[in-house]
Amino acid sequence: MFRKIFLALVVTAVPSMGFAQQGQETARARAIISPDGTSTCASTYSFGSGNTFFKFCVTDNGNITQFESPVGVEHIRNGTFAEGYSVCDVNANKQYYDYADAGDSGNWGAPVKTQPGGPNTFPLTIKRTTTDGLFTLTQTFTRVTSERIVKISTTLKNNVPVAKPVHLIRFADVDANGVFSNYVDQGVEAAWGYNPFQYGLMLFVATPAVNHFANSLNFGTGQFADSCALPGNSSVTPALEDGSIYAGYNFSLGANAAKTLAFEYKRF
């Protein structure tokens, strides 16, 4: 239901003026976000300076809603601050997602954070269980400073004594270099957004031994990162558009079993 509301409200025309586009992109998502969602930074990390500068933040729910590198060049926190995760229970055709400003499914329980050193420190682990009790998602955040990489170790646990085929994805509305129109494209293990002769942001599957996929979407026309449908871009890629990216895995979780997989964001 939430996805249908989201698609009905999005603006299908992408304005050519940057400020107009920013206003529409922000309003369309924030107007429908449920009380469960947030794009507010709870922990912020920054390293280096100048061209080696690297800054990102994580919300209480485990969304990365800021990725700045080099200094002054932001790739996510523009317009709609949209980033997060989704699980599909394939047999039930049911999604559990949280994409910060781009909406959440309303069926996640409250996050449980483990951060012994307090805000803005590592280690940082965020655990959430679905409100129906079927799945628990645990995210552990680390970074590789020298390569400007954020690593997200993600463990999905099946809490019932029945095996379940699932899809697990990571999604981001990339506004590389602080502008909405980027070239977006995808490969076998990654999807990315960039501007020629500038910078870009790439999302990798970092456990390639497990069945995986990656794709880009035309966020400006309302394409949604549906982990049950796994849509592809409505444009021929590489496409210059208000694009978004996702990557993920499809696998079977045994009865009461858990699987740990990894995602990485990298500035390039």
Image: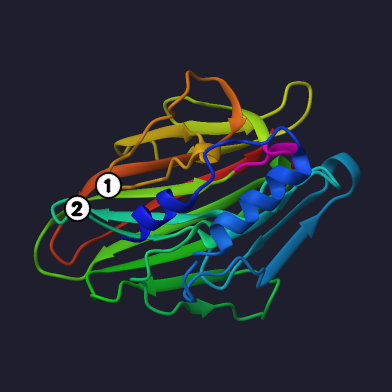
Instruction: Examine the structure image and report whether residue 260 is included in the region drawn in magenta.
Output: no
Amino acid type assigned to the residue bearing label 2 in the image: Asn
Does 175 appear in magenta? yes
Residue 180 pos. (x, y %): 68, 38
**Magenta highlight range:** 174-180
Tell me if residue 236 comes above or below residue 260 in the rendering: above
Give the x, y percent position of residue 72.
Answer: 85, 47
Q: Quadrant of residue 60?
A: bottom right
Q: Could you tell whether 31 is left or right of 70 in the image?
A: left
Q: Assign the N terminus to one quadrant of the image.
A: bottom left
Q: Position of residue 264 (x, y in %)?
A: 54, 45
The residue nearer to you, when weighing 232 against 152, is 232
Residue 208: name its quadrant: top left
**Which amino acid, by three-letter code, is at mark 1?**
Cys
Question: Spatial distance from mark 2 to mark 1, Cα to Cα?
Answer: 6 Å
What residue is rendered at 71% in x and 71% in y?
120
Nearer-the-camera pick, 38 or 58: 38
**x, y (%) of residue 65?**
63, 58
Q: Secondary structure at mark 2?
A: loop
Assess whether mark 1 and mark 2 are in contact (beta carbons under 8 angstroms).
Answer: yes
Residue closest to the eye, 92 or 103: 103
Q: Quadrant of residue 28?
A: bottom right
Q: Which mark is residue 228?
A: 1
Label 2 Cα neighbours within 10 Å, binned few <14 / some 14-19 / many ≥20? few
Residue holding disc 2: 93
